[in-house]
Image (tube, grey):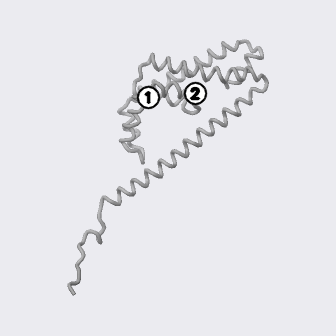
Amino acid sequence: MLPLAGFSAGAGAGFTLLGAILWCTAGSLVGAWVLYGLGALLGRERTRKILNALPLVNPNDVVRTEAFFDKYGLWTVFFGRMIPIFRSLISLPAGVTRMHLAKFTALTTAGSLIWNTILISAGYALGANWHVVEEYVGVASKVVLVLIVAALIVWIALRIRKNRKLAGTDHLTDIDAEPRETDPE
C-alpha cells in the first residue's frame, strides 16, 4: 500500500508526498497503540500463563525473552518497525512490559516514519511502475517468513529432542535398576 500511496501522491490524487508520509505514519502509530494496549491489557502474568500453557514452551525461555526485551526493547521497537512481519507484532511485548508510552510512541513514530518515507518515496519516484517496490518488499517479507518458519522448525525439533532426552533420564529401566550377579566360577 505504501508505494501505491506514493504513486497516488505523484499522480495528483489530492494529497502530497509529505501528506502521504505523515498520514501513513499516523496510521502506523494508531495501529501500534492498539497492539500495545492489547499487550498491556494482557500483562506479564497472563502472557506468561498463556505461553507456559503452550506445548514445548519452557518457562525459562519466556523469562529470558522478557529479560531481552527489558534490556533491548527500545532498539527492538525502533528497528522492528522496519522489518516486515515484526512491524506490528513488536507492539505486543512493548505493551506487556509496559514500556514507557512516550518512548514507545517516539520510537514507533521514528521507525515508521523512516520505513514509510522509503516506500512511499520509492512509489512516488517510480510512478506507474510503483508495483516494482511491492515485488522487492514482497520478496523481503517472504525471506523473513521463511527464516521465521525455519527457526521455528529447528526450535521445535530441538525442544522435542531435549524433552525426550530428559524423559529418558527421569526413570531407570528394569535392566539398569537390578544389579547384575557375576558367576563366581
Q: Which quarter of the figure is the N terminus placed in?
A: top right
Residue 123: image quadrant is top right
Q: Which quarter of the figure is the C terminus placed in?
A: bottom left
Image coords of residue 39 (percent x, y)? 44, 28
Image coords of residue 97 (percent x, y)? 40, 27
State the separation of the CA atoms marked 2 and 1. Answer: 16 Å
Name the residue rendered at 41%, 19% in the picture.
100
Left or right side of 68 for 85: right
Q: Assess disc 1: are there few (<14), some (14-19) or many (≥20) residues with their C-alpha within 10 Å of its C-alpha.
A: few
Residue type highlighted by circle 2 = Met
Image coords of residue 69 (percent x, y)? 42, 30
Image coords of residue 129 (percent x, y)? 78, 27
The residue labelled by disc 1 is: 72
Sequence-earlier tag: 2 or 1: 1
The numbered mark at residue 82 is 2
Disc 2, SS: loop
Do tag 2 and tag 1 residues touch (Cβ < 8 Å)? no
Residue found farthest to the left: 184
